[in-house]
Image: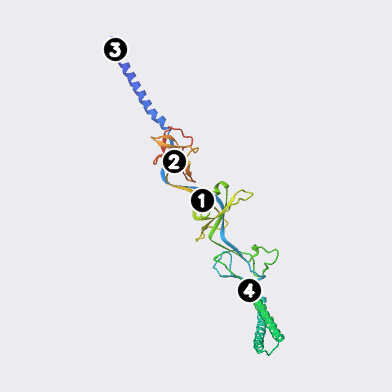
Amino acid sequence: MKKTAHLLTIVGLFLASMLWTACGSRKSQEKPAAESLNVIPVQAVPVVRQKVSERLAYTGTLEAWRKINITPETGGKVAKIYVEEGQRVQKGQLLAELDTESLSFQLQQAEAALAVADANKKNATRNKERMDRLLAEKAVSDAQVEQVKLGYEAAKAQFEQAQAAVNLVRHALDVSIMKAPWNGIVASKNAEVGDVINPMMGNFSPQSGVLTLVDYSRIKITVEVSQSDVVRIRKGQPAVVRISGAETKDIPGTVAVVNSTADPLARKFRVEVQADNPDLVLRPGTFGSVLFEVQSRDNVLVVPQKAVLDNTHVFIVENGRAARRDVTLGLRNTLVIEVIAGLKEGDEVIVEGNYGLIAGTPVEVKR
């Protein structure tokens, strides 16, 4: 009986030992499985050194830097228009002309009057020269000399008057022919053949010209800048004109105008930026952004904007877990922020999955 009891005791202890081992093994297997369920997937990038520039961004409408309404100085009927809308023209190219038939007749009349005046002047000149010789010989009276002199002065004045009349008609003919003052593109036709143009009429406006010519080989964009920002912008300062479309393009430009007085209603300051546009990529009338680089630093630690939470801290990946780092920030732009203190080069800073993250949480970096 004692042997049987002893045997049963040994068997019980063996079974208990096996059960304990099995339970311990199951717990050791369940613990990593449970922990793996709490791992947070994140995206992280290394902290790097680079140049960072602080920029101010404003939006405005692009305009051609030169625009003119082609208008004759004299009135008349439009006889011919030689160009079409959208056509490129060169400086000095003939664009349009007025009907000049009546001016041609006026020129003939004025030239005939000039010929008569010229003949009278020549005759008066000969009389004066003859009278001067006789006066030297004391062969004529002072009254006769005075009379010839007056005749010469009158003939000279009539000649000058006739010459001025000819010049006036010729000028009217010249300005009746409209030429391009510079290279550009015909933006619009504002009149048709047969229309009467009269710049002296009270209801005439610059838009009443025959054609509108623009030159946007160089463009300008005007933006309204706040008082706090205008003090950081100066004439001649580099700027970037950015347009968005199928692909974003950045065109280098220069600040051309900084208005020193604010608009009385908007309380904003007008700033004009100009940029070369040789390929005509920038189109007048479209929207664009202006980026002013107001400050920059080279070879500084930077992190993406979205890595910084509440402007105070970031999370980095350390030994497979999220670790909080309080940071001191410097310059920033639309993409990155300078980190003055709190991080070192090469730290893996979390940029996705960082919102609501708790320090010490296991994380898995998704590349």
| Percent of width and height locating residue 138 | 67, 89
In the image, farthest residue toward the front = 138
Residue that carries the numbered disc 1 in the rendered image: 292
Going by the numbered disc 4, the residue's amino acid type is His
Q: Circle 1: is it few (<14), some (14-19), or many (20+) Cα within 10 Å? A: many
Callout 2: 10 Å neighbours few (<14), some, many (20+)? some
Describe the element under mark 1 as helix, strand or loop.
Answer: strand
Looking at the image, is mark 2 or mark 1 earlier in the sequence?
A: 1
Q: Which mark is residue 171?
A: 4
Separation of residues labelled 2 and 4 (CA atoms):
71 Å
**Circles 2 and 1: CB distance less than 8 Å?**
no
Residue 154 appears in view: yes
Ranked by sequence position, the earlier of labels 1 and 4 is: 4
Mark 2 or mark 3, which has the lower sequence index? 3
Instruction: Give the total of numbered labels.
Output: 4
At a point 39% along the width and 30% down the height, the residue shown is: 32
| Left-right relation of 357 to 4 | right
Q: Amino acid at mark 3?
A: His
SS label for mark 4: helix
Q: Quadrant of the C terminus?
A: top left
Category of crowding for the residue at label 3, using alpha-carbon neighbours closer than 10 angstroms: few (below 14), some (14–19), many (at least 20): few
> Which mark is first along the chain, 3 or 4?
3
